[in-house]
Image (cartoon, grey):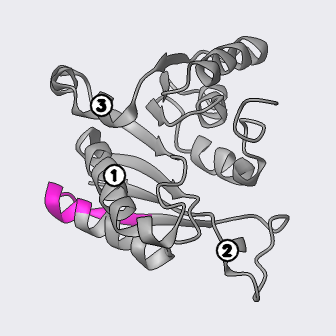
Amino acid sequence: MQTAQKTGFYLDQRAQHAAVAKYCAGKRVLDAFCNQGPFALHAARAGAAEVLGLDSAEEAIAAARRNAGRNGAQATFAVANVFDWFNDPARETEALWDVIVLDPPPFAKSKSALEGALRGYKEINLRAIQRLAPGGVLATYTCSHHMHDEQLRGVLAEAAADTRRRVQVLEWCHQPADHPVLATMPESEYLRGYIVRVD
């Protein structure tokens, strides 16, 4: 609690943990930027055949493993830079994933960082799409209030075009009611995402 990001379970995402879980029964699930593993644990409890959670923070991965043990969830967790992991040539010989979750920390903490952030979001979504089996599900999120819905949707469209894959929106996601958006405080609107099928 004192050194991790928030509580590690990001209660503003609790509805999304359940939303993604319903696609996971019998599937291979990759939870990238997993922090303490809430998406991974929900996937495992929903009956996923295999679950892998990745995060660059050793403390977060240690907590995710403890959480899995306490909840009787069958999931594997590894310390890894997600960008480097996707770009590792070893990925080319591995089986494709059925469900991938991308819930990274904010890439754009300031408006001036948005252009670089958009490149980062496109790169990570493109790599995820490449590693999805046909008909697979990608759940992708941003918690940067500088990035708007149309920009995230544009990132998905560009990544789909570059990979020659068809992306269909299944669900559009926003922060829950207990994280209200104030009309006079635009930075209070920060969480958005899409759950899409990739053919």
Mark 1: few/some/many CA within 10 Å (<14, 14-19, 20+): many
Which residues fall within the magenta stretch? 159-169
Residue, x 48% and y 27% (percent of image)? 56
Mark 3: few/some/many CA within 10 Å (<14, 14-19, 20+): few
Which residue has dot 3 on it? 84
Residue, x 51% and y 46% (percent of image)? 104
Disc 3 marks which amino acid?
Asp
Q: CA distance from mark 2 to mark 1?
A: 24 Å
Q: CA distance from mark 2 to mark 3?
A: 31 Å
Residue, x 63% and y 24% (percent of image)? 60
Q: Above or below — where is 66 with respect to 98?
A: above
Q: Residue 161: where, in percent of width, then height? A: 18, 65
Secondary structure of the residue carrying numbered label 3: helix
Residue, x 76% and y 64% (percent of image)? 176
Q: Residue 14: where, in percent of width, then height? A: 74, 48
Q: Above or below — where is 185 with respect to 89?
A: below
Q: Residue 138: where, in percent of width, then height? A: 42, 50
Q: Which numbered disc, 1 or 3, marks the residue that appears first in the sequence? A: 3
Q: Which numbered disc, 2 or 1, marks the residue that appears first in the sequence? A: 1
Q: CA distance from mark 1 to mark 3?
A: 14 Å
Q: Residue 140: where, in percent of width, then height? A: 47, 54
Which residue has dot 2 on it? 187
Secondary structure of the residue carrying numbered label 2: helix
Q: Which numbered disc, 2 or 3, marks the residue that appears first in the sequence? A: 3
Look at the image and tell me in which quarter the N terminus lies: top right
| Relative horizontal placement of residue 146, taking residue 191 as reference (left or right) | left
The one nearer the camera, 12 or 183, is: 183
Secondary structure of the residue carrying numbered label 1: helix
Q: Above or below — where is 53 with respect to 153?
A: above
